């Protein structure tokens, strides 16, 4: 909360069945409860500002609360990315799913796994229903259909991502509003040759029965020169870390223990459990950043990512790259992980983030043996 509790920004509260539910300002209220002794937080080392025993709140109906939260985060602060806005609007404001959201769901997370795709201009100018139709994709309700084979879909999407990363598809330049003109000729040929092909329901590879990283590795061993690491065999943070005593080490130890429980197989968890791990990794990164005097995690990542990446094997680098965990994407992935949205529940991506974060912590907070 900083050095003082900001009274100018009121938590938004709705009474449901006689119980007050905080719709916005949850973290402020929890910290206030800790400060006042209503909630016990073991091993809390940070200083909390003074908080009044009675907090002024914006108490309203659920409809008003949801509209206020949406207005605050979308229209005023613009603090949510494009996909978060669409998820909130559909889930809570009961708006129909946008083509952007349906395409992410239909492709198994192509947008949410690639932060470069999760931008307002991509939603408004690239992955629109009209342009998707021109690319050979259609919707029947929420279900995605395509005119292409699975391999052609992969080539097409990879090319779109590549062009956006290189800013050849961008908000400026001669191809503004004409993103299909920028695609490679081989991709244009795929689109043109299949434009009269019959539509078929598209199922992402990750959702197909019997599909797994281990199975793919066995099937493709004869064509690969680099062994593909099996995610299930990789420890969280890549290895056991020996860190300096303090909050960073405590958080690291707790997250490692939590990951072992979630991944251990003795207790069945939903995919949302990986959202919890993502939130924890974001908190760990923030704590490490603040200890070193950085005002934002981006500064910490920019400082330590390049050296950390060099310590990883080529096999691990390939694993990170395949899950789009890069120096350019890591900051956005950390921010996305602060919210329990669909984009935060990829087990492999959470593991990749922990590996590179572990390598950075080893440099910034490592203790000499």
Image (tube, grey):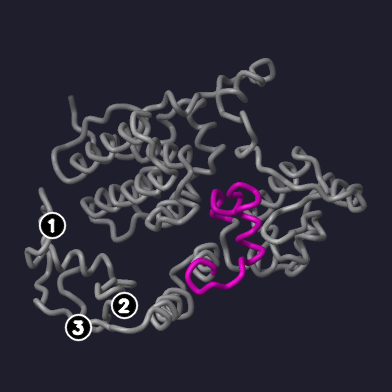
In terms of secondary structure, where does tag 1 sit? loop
**Separation (CA) of disc 3 from disc 2:** 13 Å
Question: Dot 1 corresponds to which residue?
Answer: 46
**Residue shown at the point (52%, 32%) measured from the top left:** 319
Q: Quadrant of residue 40?
A: bottom left
Q: Which residues are magenta?
A: 90-116
Do the residues under discs 3 and 1 have CB atoms within 8 angstroms?
no
Question: Dot 2 corresponds to which residue?
Answer: 14
Question: Dot 3 corresponds to which residue?
Answer: 56
Q: Is residue 92 magenta?
A: yes
Please, what is the dominant secondary structure of the magenta stretch? loop
Q: Quadrant of residue 324?
A: top right
Q: Residues within 10 Å of mark 2 (few under 14, many from 20)?
A: many
Q: Earlier in the sequence, mark 3 or mark 2?
A: 2
Q: Residues within 10 Å of mark 3 (few under 14, many from 20)?
A: few
Q: Position of residue 29 (x, y in %)?
A: 21, 69
């Amino acid at each position: 909360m900083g050095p003082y509790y900001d009274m100018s920004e009121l938590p938004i509260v709705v009474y449901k069945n006689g119980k007050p539910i905080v719709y916005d300002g949850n973290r402020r209220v929890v910290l206030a409860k800790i400060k006042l002794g209503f909630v016990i937080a073991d091993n809390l080392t940070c200083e909390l500002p003074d908080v009044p025993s009675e907090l002024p709140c914006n108490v309203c109906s659920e409809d008003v609360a949801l509209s206020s939260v949406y207005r605050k985060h979308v229209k005023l602060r613009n603090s949510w990315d494009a996909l978060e806005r669409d998820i909130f609007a559909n889930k809570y404001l009961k708006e129909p799913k946008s083509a952007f959201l349906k395409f992410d769901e239909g492709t198994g997370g192509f947008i949410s796994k690639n932060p470069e795709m999760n931008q307002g201009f991509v939603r408004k100018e690239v992955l629109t229903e009209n342009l998707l139709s021109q690319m050979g994709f259609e919707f029947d309700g929420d279900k995605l259909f395509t005119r292409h084979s699975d391999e052609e879909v992969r080539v097409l999407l990879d090319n779109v991502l590549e062009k956006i990363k290189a800013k050849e598809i961008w908000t400026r330049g001669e191809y503004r509003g004409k993103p299909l003109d920028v695609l490679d000729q081989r991709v244009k040929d795929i689109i043109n040759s299949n434009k009269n092909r019959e539509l078929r329901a598209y199922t992402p590879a990750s959702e197909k029965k019997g599909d797994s990283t281990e199975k793919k590795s066995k099937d493709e061993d004869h064509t690969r020169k680099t062994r593909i690491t099996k995610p299930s065999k990789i420890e969280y943070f890549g290895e056991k870390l020996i860190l300096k005593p303090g909050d960073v080490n405590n958080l690291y130890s707790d997250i490692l223990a939590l990951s072992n429980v979630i991944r251990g197989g003795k207790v069945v968890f939903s995919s949302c459990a990986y959202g919890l791990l993502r939130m924890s990794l974001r908190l760990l990164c923030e704590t490490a950043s603040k200890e070193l005097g950085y005002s934002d995690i981006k500064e910490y990542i920019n400082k330590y990512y390049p050296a950390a990446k060099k310590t990883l094997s080529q096999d691990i680098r390939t694993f990170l790259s395949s899950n789009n965990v890069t120096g350019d994407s890591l900051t956005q992935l950390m921010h996305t992980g602060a919210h329990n949205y669909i984009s935060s529940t990829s087990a492999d991506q959470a593991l990749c983030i922990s590996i590179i974060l572990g390598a950075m912590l080893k440099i910034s907070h490592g203790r000499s043996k």
